Image (spheres, rainbow, N blue to C red):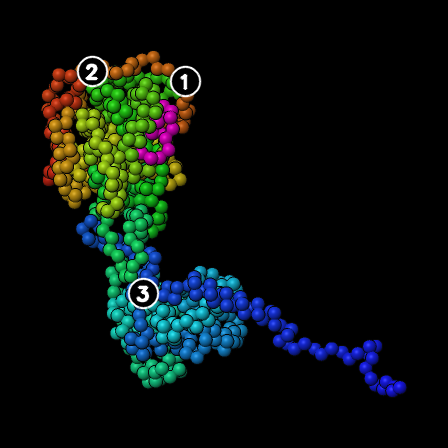
Amino acid sequence: MLETPAFATTPDHAPPPARPSWWHRHRRNLLVALGLFLLAFAWMAWRLPLNRALEPLPDPTLVLVDRHGEPFARRGAYKEAPVDAAALPPHVPAAFVAIEDRRFFDHMGIDLRGITRAAVQNVRAGEVRQGGSTITQQLAKTAFLEPDRTFRRKIREALIALYLEARLSKEEILSRYLSAVYFGDGVYGLRAAARHYFDKPPEKLDLGEAAMLAGLVKAPSRLAPTNDLEAARARMRVVLQAMAETGAITPEQARKARRPRVREGRAALPVGTWFADWVSPQAKEAFGADYGEIRVRTTLDARMQRHALRTVQRWLAREGARSNASQAALVAMSPEGDVRALVGGRDYKASQFDRATQARRQPGSAFKLFTYWAALEQGASPATPIQDTPLTLGDWSPENYDGRYAGTIPLREAFARSSNVAAVRLVDRLGPEAVVRAARELGIESELGSDATIALGTYEVTLLELTAAYAAFAAGAAPVVPHGLPAMRPATPAAPLDPRRRAMMLDLLWGVVDHGTGRAARLGVPAFGKTGTTQDYRDALFVGMAGDLVVGVWVGNDDGSPMRRVTGGGLPARIWRDFMDDALRMAPSRGRPAERVRGAPVPGPAPVDVEGMDPDVIPEDVDAAPGEPMPFPVEALEPADELPPEDVAVEDAPPAEVPETVDVAPPEDVPAPPVERGEDDDGGAATVAGRLLPGLATKQRPRARRPVPAAGASAAHG
């Protein structure tokens, strides 16, 4: 029997197993990574359109022009049609490659050598001075990713760069990059940059211009030649040196390159104004993505807008400090709601907040328009008697501003005086819900309460919507929807107002300006309006109409601090009149308001002759014109739950005497229309059409320009 050799393998002495190869050890992980990589490529092929960089911006540049075609603002970024790198002069793409990615034609989207070089330079400098992103990575970032600085975004950027290199040629990548990169001043793409900075197409850029544009990419906002020309030229020299180092040009060509002259190809326009801020969302909805600039015609009258801003600033400069009034707002519109001018404050650069469209303020007695409109709808007339005497509703005892009461007076006189107690009596009998319905009918959308204090304008509205509500009586239909684009006029026509009641309401508004709290707003043509003042003089308003314009003015402070006895019949009425003096010549009436009410009843004159009276005194012994009885009793008012007196808006003081420096048109400039009593004898509201209402469309007669009171002149109350 053979013996087993001593060196033979036995179970107790087995050799160690062979070590698996690297492939066998990592095969599973590599296959998973490869699968994920392929899935990422498949996702990118499905989700990433290769031509995104060539597409127009979703929000194109909007050049807003006024109703006469004059540009006044530019909004949005600017991008022109794509460029073809192969069609450009060789020095143009060479400039970008030399300064942004010297190894562009040698790598596959990620340049490891460039990343290493940039890291070394940054370490030596102790700060980040160079980036390692290639042109392909920059394209991936600008076209497909958000500009956040995270590791996750860098990984996605690298993957997309590899994908772009696999799908596109180098020339295609470069063309897309040049068509999408940002050049400052809101300009994207080489074609737009060449037009914006040098007023020429990119195919005609010389060496210096191409180098300057290539240099902007590093810090476009800081290096834009419109912002810092010397910095742009210094960066241009760096680009020229890089081009010489890469052999794109010779050192001699770099030295002889001309210094570019910046010739902006687009007119300099402000980016923001209050009107532009308000109308831009409407314009963006009307226009989609496109190249270049889109001219958008608006309803604004640029000349009238400049006049409105000057008027507001001039009055605040002269009266603001003394009156403790730091801000004002003005909105002017046509009877159809076409906004012609919009001033949202004293200075747009200092504050972009729009006090005409965004601020909600108590309108004070300017809200009485809706109370009286509700009364007219219930059968009252301007001659209907109302008690102007003290009253108490529950724990609340509203008072007239001056503490004076006139007894029984007609509605037209109560409205002209802006009697608080008369308005509260109307609301108490009509019901607050009737006033709310009237406000809604005329276009008020702000939240309104249902208590008697609504008579005094305690609920907040914007100046824009309040002015539009007044415009309904100029248009003869409601609601009037204010708009800034002619194409955005409401498709549904407004409902016509009852001509007879509208005539009565205009009679009331005329009386305010003719002999009431709004006398400081009198013009050389018939004017209609209402004053409003809130608790402790925090807000003062005047809203009125004349010719073909409806204008609202607010004066106050952003923090709600009280002014020094500024009422709606004072500073706001004077601003209104100063604006209207010239604005009526800029927007001559076309007679439409009169045409709308042809054949309608016309209000008669106020029953009080104010000729020769002290303008500070409104007589208390008004002889009310005979009229039909009130359709509801004015006695036996039942108490109601009301706000305490300190929360209730106060009303305007009687207007103080106008300073001598103000040329107020004499009463004969606005003659009271002759009265022809109808059988119902409603105080003139049934007279023949054409005597007062056509005054809305009367051309302004030549008159001396009303000077602004000098500093120190007394301001009127109203």
Is residue 447 in the magenta section? Answer: yes
Q: CA distance from mark 1 to mark 2?
A: 30 Å
Magenta segment main secondary structure: loop
Residue 404 visible, this orientation: no
**Mark 1 and mark 3: Cα distance apart in space:** 68 Å
Residue 142 drawn at (x, y percent): 41, 64
Q: Which residue is mark 2?
A: 628
* Mark 1 lies on residue: 394
Disc 2 crowd rating (10 Å Cα; few below 14, some 14-19, many 20+) is some
Q: Tell which circle, 2 or 3, labels the residue nearer the N-terminal end.
A: 3
Q: Tell me the quarter of the image containing the N terminus.
A: bottom right
Span colored in magenta:
444-458
Residue at screen point 39% across, 64% down: 49
Examine the rendered structure and indicate whether residue 713 appears above or below residue 654: below
The amino acid sitting under disc 3 is: Thr
State left or right for residue 582 relative to residue 245: left
- Residue of label 3: 226
Q: Describe the element under mark 1 as helix, strand or loop.
A: loop
Instruction: Identify the residue shown where x is 71% and y is 79%.
Output: 18
